[in-house]
């Protein structure tokens, strides 16, 4: 998969996406990642990317010209690339969206800053506006890192021998046969830590009982922490 990120803070993306699994994915050739400075597509002496809002109001708005130049350049060799704008006004990102994006061959992420991005960018260039949650970050670069990490770890070969995505929280209901549940608690050695023992069933070696216990724990945890996933009010 090819991914381009366009931001005025390239280092906010390069550092986190240069570590761990994301680094391995690039070394393995599964991911080809390029992080671009939006200012490289400005044409004025000051490399200006923002301006005052029409109609008044606080803050600055990101200018359209650098985004149009960036997307035209990045789409030159792949006109079918999907363009995603990170914005708190977007559709909420979730695991199903990550699975869908993981089937694409080229994603271009545009990161907003200040009060927002000139709406002509959204109308003419953007296929999908995405928010990572109902809170406001200082800029979209951090949100782009979150989305890229969640998508790339689903690509074949990235998780290696680790367990499959079907076994984890928010697994695909079409695969698991039940609605999305949070994972059951995990334990490792020692069997007794400062008087807190590991649940007996996990040391029993009885796979059927362990599977039943894990499912019950998953349901109870989901009920407690995310009743909305079970169709109940929070
Ligand atoms: N930019 C600022 N806040 C954001 C959010 N919650 N999601 C995506 N992009 C953002």
Image (cartoon, rainbow, N blue to C red):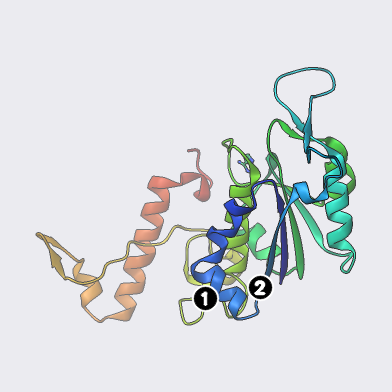
Left or right of 223 on screen, residue 104: right
In this figure, what is the number of numbered marks? 2
Crowding near pointer 2: few (<14 within 10 Å), some, many (20+)?
A: many
Q: Secondary structure at mark 1?
A: loop
Residue at position x 39%, y 65% from top? Answer: 215
Q: Quadrant of residue 4?
A: bottom right
Q: Residue furthest front?
A: 45
Measured as percent of width and height from the top left, residue 61 is found at: 76, 31
Taking depth in this image into account, of 150 and 222 the one nearest to the observer is 150
Residue at position x 73%, y 28% from top? Answer: 60
Can you see residue 10? yes
**The N terminus lies in which quarter of the figure?**
bottom right
Residue at position x 71%, y 64% from top? Answer: 3
Crowding near pointer 1: few (<14 within 10 Å), some, many (20+)?
A: some
Can you see residue 94? no
Mark 1 sits on what residue? 159
Taking depth in this image into account, of 103 and 76 the one nearest to the observer is 76
Measured as percent of width and height from the top left, residue 67 is found at: 82, 47
Q: Is mark 1 within 8 Å of ligand 1?
A: no
Q: Quadrant of residue 94?
A: bottom right
Mark 2 sits on what residue? 31
Left or right of 220 on screen, residue 197: left
Looking at the image, is mark 1 or mark 2 earlier in the sequence?
A: 2
Left or right of 232 on screen, residue 77: right
Q: Is mark 2 within 8 Å of ligand 1?
A: no
Ligand 1 falls in quadrant? top right
């Amino acid at each position: 998969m090819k991914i381009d990120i366009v931001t005025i803070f390239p280092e906010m993306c390069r550092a986190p996406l240069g570590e761990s699994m994301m680094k391995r994915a690039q070394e393995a050739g599964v991911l080809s990642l390029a992080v671009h400075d939006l200012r490289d597509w400005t044409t004025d002496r000051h490399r200006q990317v923002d301006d005052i809002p029409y109609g008044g109001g606080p803050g600055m708005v990101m200018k359209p010209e650098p985004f149009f130049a960036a997307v035209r350049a990045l789409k030159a060799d792949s006109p079918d690339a999907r363009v995603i704008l990170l914005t708190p006004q977007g559709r909420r990102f979730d695991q199903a969206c990550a699975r869908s994006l993981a089937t694409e061959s080229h994603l271009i992420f545009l990161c907003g800053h200040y009060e927002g991005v000139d709406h002509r960018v959204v109308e003419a260039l953007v296929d999908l506006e995405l928010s990572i949650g109902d809170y406001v970050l200082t800029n979209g670069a951090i949100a782009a890192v979150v989305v890229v990490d969640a998508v790339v770890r689903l690509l074949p070969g990235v998780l290696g021998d680790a367990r499959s995505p079907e076994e984890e929280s928010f697994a695909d209901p079409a695969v698991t046969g039940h609605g999305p549940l949070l994972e059951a608690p995990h334990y490792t050695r020692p069997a007794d830590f400062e008087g807190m023992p590991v649940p007996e069933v996990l040391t029993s070696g009885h796979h059927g009982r362990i599977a039943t216990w894990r499912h019950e724990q998953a349901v109870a945890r989901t009920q407690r922490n995310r009743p909305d996933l079970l169709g109940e009010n929070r």
